[in-house]
Amino acid sequence: MELIPESFNPLLARSLPFVIARRALFLPVWNNDAGQLVVWVTQYTDPYVFDQYRMSAAQPVVPVLVTKEQLLDALQRVHQEDNTTVDQILEDLPPSILATQLAEKPDLLEADDEAPIIGLVNSLIVQALRHRASDIHIEPFEDRIIVRFRVDGHLHEALRPPKPVQAPFMSRIKIMAGLNIAERRLPQDGSMRVQFANRDVDVRVSVLPSNYGERLVMRLLEKQKERTNLTDLGLTDDQLAWMQARSMANHGILLVTGPTGSGKSTTLYALLSRGAFPVCQHSSSDRRGCV
């Protein structure tokens, strides 16, 4: 019986494309001392795809039965730690995209020559999540595009894609958000949901026309993100005591201000999560009451 290793070869695991591993439910994990390829499988593994992989392997394959949850967790972890950067994807873009400004097609998802754009957009979102960014700002200029991440309320430049990437790049994001790719003169708002490391992330997309093309902002909202406590906000003891005292007052208003992404909502949710004071609401029946 082959023992399950505590850690495995991430390069070997990434040799099988994520889509195939996710759908067929098997994952190559390491080469043992006997020169065999150890592959994780589950009771739900697609036998046909696995047999094709076994026959094409250059060495004997040893299947190891694990749970579906173990395999999916390892798969997400391995590809989350992939060191492929957005800059590397930009360098690998084919000349057909960079040479000229490409005309938009009705369905970019089916265009083979624009497949790298899909990887570019996905990697951009992953990189922003790794940096714990709250927003992605994409701003076009006359001869370049600048992508910035908002981290802790401040915008930081992330990369500068070449200008010819602008049209397919923007169109891909608009397709994901359910927006009209043919409309470039009016503002548009949309949303999409992506998954990152087994976490659901809601993305709100806002598009505005500008002199050099459309400006786009993506707001990243992690649904499973842990709630922050008041003590984790970096407040001094005096500030913390003041906040707690004001939250217990039976009248008045507590006003929280700050720039976009500075933590206003986080502060208020941290205050509400204390649960130490009543929140009053009115109903149509008695017009009063506290919950």
Image (tube, helix red, strand yellow):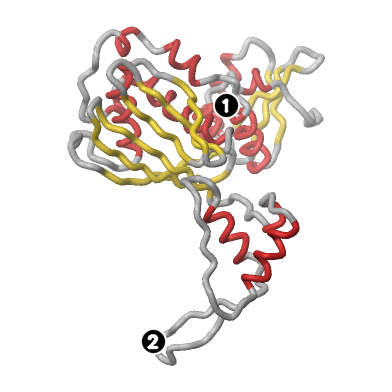
The amino acid type found where label 1 is placed reads: Phe
8 vs 177, left or right, is right
- Name which of mark 2 and mark 1 comes first in the sequence: 1
Q: Residue at x 51, y 63 (%)?
A: 255
Q: Describe residue 143's horizontal placement relative to residue 240 as left or right.
A: left
Tags 2 and 1 touching, CB below 8 Å: no
Q: Is disc 2 surrounded by few (<14), some (14 to 19) or many (20+) residues within 10 Å?
A: few
The picture places residue 38, in percent across and down from the top left corner, at 71, 23
Q: What label does residue 211 carry, if any? A: none
Where residue 122 appears, as percent x and y from the top left, is 45, 30
Residue 54 appears in view: yes
Left or right of residue 92: residue 107 = left
Q: Residues within 10 Å of mark 1 (few under 14, many from 20)?
A: some
Q: Position of residue 85 (x, y in %)?
A: 53, 20
Q: Residue 279 appears in which quarter of the rendering?
A: bottom right
In this rendering, the label closer to the viewer, 2 or 1: 2
Q: Can you identify the residue that label 2 sits on?
A: 284
> Which residue is painted at 43% across and 89% down in the image?
287
Is residue 48 visible to us here? no
Q: How many marks overall? A: 2
Amino acid identity at mark 2: Ser
**Residue that mark 1 sits on:** 50
The one of 133 and 93 positioned closer to us in this rendering: 133
Q: Position of residue 150 (x, y in %)?
A: 50, 37
Q: Name the image quarter holding the N terminus.
A: top right
In the foreground, 38 or 128: 128
Question: Residue placed at 67% from the left, 22% from the top?
Answer: 10
Residue at position x 58%, y 42% from top?
A: 198
Which quarter of the figure is the C terminus placed in? bottom right
